[in-house]
Amino acid sequence: MSFPVERPRRLRRTAALRRLVAETELRPSDLVAPLFVREGIDAPQPIASLPGVAQHSLTSLRKEVRHLASLRVAGCILFGVPLRKDAEGSGASDPDGIVQRALREVRDEVGDELVVMADLCLDEYTDHGHCGVLAPDGSVDNDATLERYARAAVAQATAGAAVVAPSGMMDGQVGAIRTALDAAGHEAVAVLAYSAKYASALYGPFREAVDVTIAGGGDRRSYQQDPANAREALREVALDLAEGADMVMVKPALAYLDVLAAVASTSPVPVAAYHVSGEYAMVKAAAAQGWIDGDAVMAEHVGAIKRAGADFVLTYAAADLAASCA
Ligand code: PBG
């Protein structure tokens, strides 16, 4: 050989060398499992578009969180499926609403072994399926919605949420929630803000999981971010930080790794990413056809989300990944 060759392959030669130089590693403590709890059922109901994920009864939910804690998964985030929905989404703040009941059961089961989070939004509880209450003209009323979020936050904190996670993308939601929590003596409850949440087509299976259809074939583009925009995400993060967010989130994850990397490179607080229902479902569907190795692709995807800068990842694959990296 007459010319010098750089040899990066030297460090790839053995598994031990590769482990030595690995820059990132997926651990159970990086993972948060989204969990669905449905009112009025006594056995878990599978969700067709999310293979391996179920709507839980209160009893099966207890078993699931026990299992997650035994795998050393970091946390769970609860979503409720109520029996009845109304225009105000009153189930979101009812002390006996399904998520509040579930939070009490989960805290009783696992205490602080898992970080118990509650998604804070109205869409699972409104009969029109929007994330806020509606003005007479049918638009989503930002400031009237903030009052509903404030009440839901206090109800969730009172029921035992260690973290509340507002996902509705209303302006001022973090400030309204922080103020309400503090006024009710819940200074210790943290806010994980869904700061950069996009109006994505990847939420389809989730809407099956929570029985949500947006009235009149509507969409969430008047409050969730336009997928065309990255810079706007930095503004949303800055506003949430100014309003008191303890942690911020980018959602979805894989199609927004540029946004995630930009947020992670400047954020003074921990950054989460939500590997959403459609991302999970695509892997499961291709694996069911035998076209890809589902477990390997899932680990590669969630690993990429961490490499791009996420401190932790909300993913329906949390238990499977934790079991395989334990
Ligand atoms: C709103 C909410 C949604 C998701 C999490 N919180 C749905 C939406 O914005 O329409 C989607 C999560 C997923 O697809 O996994 N409460």
Image (cartoon, rainbow, N blue to C red):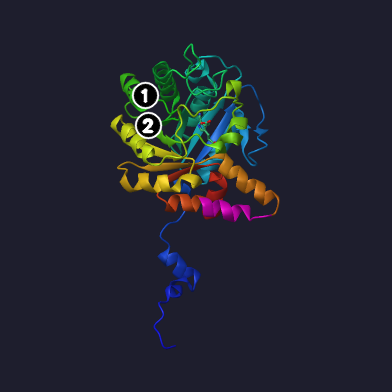
Q: Residue at x 38, y 25 (%)?
A: 173
Relative height, residue 169 to residue 285 (above, below): above
The residue where tag 1 is placed is 177
Question: Could you say which quadrant of the image residue 278 lies in?
Answer: top right
Relative height, residue 211 to residue 256 (above, below): above
Decide: marks 1, 2 in contact (CB < 8 A)?
A: yes
Relative height, residue 82 to residue 318 (above, below): above
Q: Amino acid at mark 2?
A: Val
Residue 88 magenta: no
Q: Residue at x 28, y 32 (%)?
A: 242
Q: Is residue 109 visible?
A: no
Predominant SS of the magenta segment? helix
Residue 129: image x %, image y %?
55, 22
Q: Which mark is residue 191?
A: 2
Q: Is mark 2 within 8 Å of ligand 1?
A: no
Tell which of 222 and 51 is nearer to you.
Answer: 222
Residue 283: image x %, image y %?
61, 48
Mark 1: which secondary structure? helix
Q: Residue at x 47, y 30 (%)?
A: 119
Tally of numbered discs: 2
Q: Which residues are magenta?
A: 291-301
Q: Which mark is residue 260?
A: none
Q: Residue furthest toward the right?
A: 289
Q: Residue furthest toward the front?
A: 228
Mark 2: which secondary structure? strand
Residue 146: image x %, image y %?
40, 20
